[in-house]
Amino acid sequence: MDIFIETIQSLVSDSGFAQLFSADGWKTIVMLVIAGVLIYLAIAKQFEPLLLLPIAFGMLLTNLPAPESAAIFHPEFFQSSTIDYGMVLQQGGLLDILYLGVKLGIYPPLIFLGIGAMTDFGPLIANPKSFILGAAAQAGIFLTFIIAPILGYDLNQAGAIAIIGGADGPTAIYVAKTLAPALLGSIAVAAYSYMALVPVIQPPIMKLLTTKKERSVVMEQLRPVSKTEKIIFPIVVTLIVALLIPTAIPLVGMLMLGNILKESGVADRLVKTAQNELMNIITIFLGVTVGATATADVFLTWETIGIVLLGLFAFCIGTAVGVLFGKLMYLFTGGKVNPLIGSAGVSAVPMAARVSQKVGQKENPSNFLLMHAMGPNVAGVIGSAVAAGVLLAVLG
Amino acid sequence: MQTDWGMVIGITITGLLVVFVALILLILCLYVIGGVSVFLKKRKEDKLQSQPKAESVKSVRPEPTVEDSLEEETVAAITAAVSLMLGQDKNFRIQSIRTAQSGVSWGAVGREEGTRPFSPFYQRDRR
């Protein structure tokens, strides 16, 4: 009878209910509620569901009340600058091993490989001036980098938070895992949430900074781009970026590898795999493991609120500066460039380009800006990767 | 921890400059590549236009006359059968296709002999 009671007592003390009613149990409940809200946003509101759903579920898994011995993820294994692989393999669980892909910087470049295989850089090649708008939109990153230390973040944390302004999830994760791994979960949630909110955040800024006449500009049709140009483009981009900012090679190199596979026309099987199976597998692994880093101790802090606010600031500034540069181009070209395409310089592809199209069509229903906006949009992907390379080179 | 504001401003300005320089270099490269591509395309078009037009020997061939009751698939099947019969070395052109007239004649007998495996009488006799 005593053995029976002892067994029951042991089971109860090791159960999740016992953890829930402990001193810090309220944090667990709050995190589970937040995970639930994110799952709702991903499914019901379709907020970047491909990433947000795995992130939210990873957050749910890691915050489930459980004793230390049954933890699904051990963030303490990855806190030092070097990884104890023996400990990870012997004592770690599934998410610990999968998290190695994040910690070692493997997943984000592979995601970029898939993105490159899905992206058509034709509009950018046809109108190279779009690169200026892609560069301008990265101002949000660097201006946020100035503001973040005022709120008490150190330089590495400021760099990791500022990259949210690039509106590029894999890039944000790639930078955060090096510069501020403790903030990775919060930064990833903020980055993907703002990417999903592009249609809500951008239009008011675009309308505020442009006149009706500017928004109504109809741009000339883009010239056709030859296959040779599309094949040379990824090689040239890789070479130039590699020579200037070698730390950006993992991201930009893989982006261009995916693109040259697509444009060459001789590697259809590889392209299909990169676009589908590879992207999907890496997306699941990345999302779940990044979400698993969002434990209560890390997420329920004033730092997270700061990250959310600074992320919004970075996003808004990036949009605004992109539109302002679009206005400059409008002036210099004698009214041939619609400033709305400047907002597409944030690299939320293709959502930001669609927003430019939608806002432009409200002024002129026969105005089709989508392909013109795709130029700055894909330029922004390269621009944010270059900006990430700069931050990693200086702060990493 | 004291923030080194000089470093912050320095990184900000340097970062923006590097991003702009990198992308401006790419713009210049793309303009060069685009310019070369357009130049080569224009040269090719000019070359084609300057060549004397080759005389067209082929005359315009009339379309084959096909009976209204015949479906396109039937015409295709007949053409394929003729091609198979003549072999790969022979070129031919269908002039017209019409239903053979019935009636007792050497032609009718010959058709009956030639299509015997498909004849309903042949099928009946073999059963």
Image (cartoon, rainbow, N blue to C red):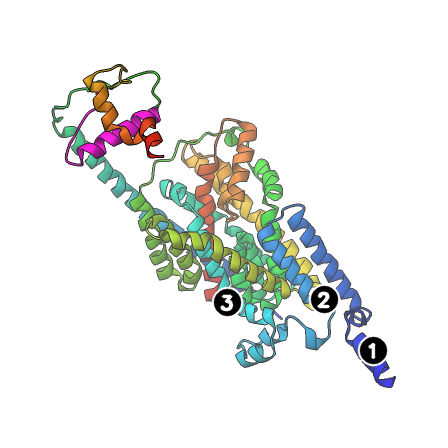
Secondary structure type for disc 3: helix
Neighbour tally class for label 3: few under 14, some 14-19, many 20 plus, Cα within 10 Å: some
Read off the magenta span: B72-95
The x and y percentages for residue A41 are 67, 49
Between B76 and A126, the one nearer to me in the picture? B76
Q: Quadrant of residue A87?
A: bottom right
Q: Earlier in the sequence, mark 3 or mark 2?
A: 2
Q: Nearer the viewer, mark 3 or mark 1?
A: 1
Whether labels 3 and 1 share one chain? yes
Q: What amino acid is labelled 1 in the image?
A: Ile
Q: Do badges 2 and 1 share one subunit? A: yes
Which quarter of the figure is the N terminus of chain A placed in?
bottom right
Alpha-carbon span between mark 3 and mark 1: 53 Å
Q: In the rendered image, which residue does mark 3 sit on?
A: A395
Tell me if A389 is positioned left or right of A186 in this view: left
The residue shown at (58%, 74%) is A78
**Of residues A331 and A355, the one drawn nearer to the viewer in this rendering:** A355
- Residue A8 numbered tag: 1
Question: The numbered mark 2 sits on a residue in which chain?
Answer: A
Q: Position of residue B29 (x, y in %)?
A: 31, 49
Q: Nearer the viewer, residue A15 or A300?
A: A15
> N-terminal of the two: label 3 or label 1?
1
Instruction: Tell me how far mark 3 sits from mark 2, CA to CA.
Output: 35 Å
Assess disc 1: are there few (<14), some (14-19) or many (≥20) residues with their C-alpha within 10 Å of its C-alpha: few
Residue A64 - label:
2
